[in-house]
Image (tube, rainbow, N blue to C red):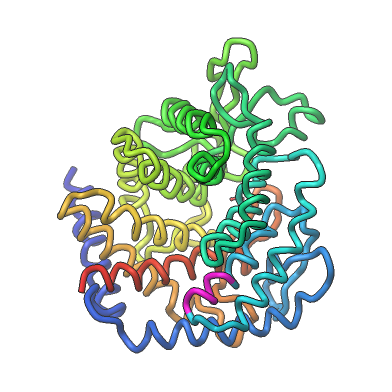
Amino acid sequence: MVKNSFVLIGFCICVLLLFSCAGTIKGTTATENNLVALLNQQAKKTVEETRVENTMPVLIEAGKQQWTNEKISNWRSGFWPGIQWYLFEATNDEYWKTQARLSTEKLSGLLDKPVYNHDLGFQLYCSYGNAFRLTGNAAYKKILLRAADSLITLYNPVVGTILSWPYRRKNDGWPHHTIIDNMMNLELLFWAAKNGGNKKYYDYAVRHATVTMQNHFRPDYSTYHVLNYDDKTGKAIKGTTHQGLADSSMWARGQAWAIYGFTMAFRETGNREFLQTAINATNVYLARVPEDLVPYWDFDDPTIPNAPRDASAAAIVASALFELAPLSKNEVLEKKYYAVANAMLAALSSKQYLSGDVNHAFLLHSTGNKPAGKDVDVSIIYADYYFLEALLRQKKSKETLK
Ligand code: GLY
């Protein structure tokens, strides 16, 4: 208890220190304006490297300057178009609208094949979702509705969740399983139900979130990465991991997806159990995050403080907290979440994490899949996406609070 109080006091001091670097919630600092200008210039370098047909930039290996491009079937393919839409939103520069449109439309072929994993939501909602939001183009809406129709074919009504990795079921004999990341892809279903798609998609998304809430959380509200279910009875069999350190550990990005996903599920439904789940998941994350607010890739790695960081998790959580703050409708929590989210962005904008001249990404030091030895301590495109999204949300929060 005493130890916990010290941790809490230390954490508050560190938030205040970082927060003071980021400026106050009211009033934009020059640093933040410069930051968007800097990211704008940085992203122009990426445009020059991504003209290869049917590929998207996904990561930059340590020691390299340029992006590795992967086929559009890669789960990360929607983030670069999404970044360009956010840059269009931030700058109102037609250049970004043109670039964003070109790279978004590269992804239309994804719907030519039956859905092959839950990531279709990441791929098409971050790209076409932002495209439709900012342009109102009916052709984009059509694609999003088709994407929802495709994603829902993975829904298992006995379990009440979407199957995350059909290929693992087919090739490795896994039972029905759902990963915590899958919460993120419910946003496409909520959107479709409101925008002329099948209204039942709302119910399926609510059921997925409810079943996840019941099974994916340990008593301290840390999450399992993967939950395996009995196909016939729908009962949860076991929580395991795939990208985390151990079945019982708190994988940083998984926890980030939980915070973001349940915040979004509350925004879409008003279900207070989802709100409380987002708050509980945030509590354990904040109680255990290191002083600089950028987590190690897994909170339970015994090699901490020498373990690699995951800046992408920090960016996802910062973005989520800018949304959770006003949604909480609780003055104390609202203040706290804004302060922490601002401090997280200040940490990510520091020399240690901001790429600058090191490479063409926005952020350094993310970790994709450490157990597989893949993408460890690199720049990853989704870290940049959620960082920029968080900066836009930060700007909106300041305008609202003026
Ligand atoms: N599947 C998304 C992730 O690696 O976080």
User: Is 276 on the left or on the right of 290, as rendered?
Assistant: left
Furthest residue toward top: 233
Q: Is residue 346 left or right of residue 19?
A: right
Q: Position of residue 94 (x, y in %)?
A: 59, 82
Residue at 54 percent across and 15 percent down: it is: 235
**In the foreground, 1 or 322:** 322
Q: Quadrant of the N terminus?
A: top left
* Percent of width and height locating residue 39: 53, 81
At a point 57% along the width and 39% down the height, the residue shown is 197
Horizontal and vertical percent position of residue 11: 26, 60
Q: Is residue 250 magenta?
A: no
Q: What residue range appears in magenta?
A: 85-90
Q: Is residue 113 above or below residue 29?
A: above
Q: Residue at x 68, y 79 (%)?
A: 46
- Note whether 280 is above or below 93 in the view shown: above
| Residue nearer the viewer, 76 or 187 | 187
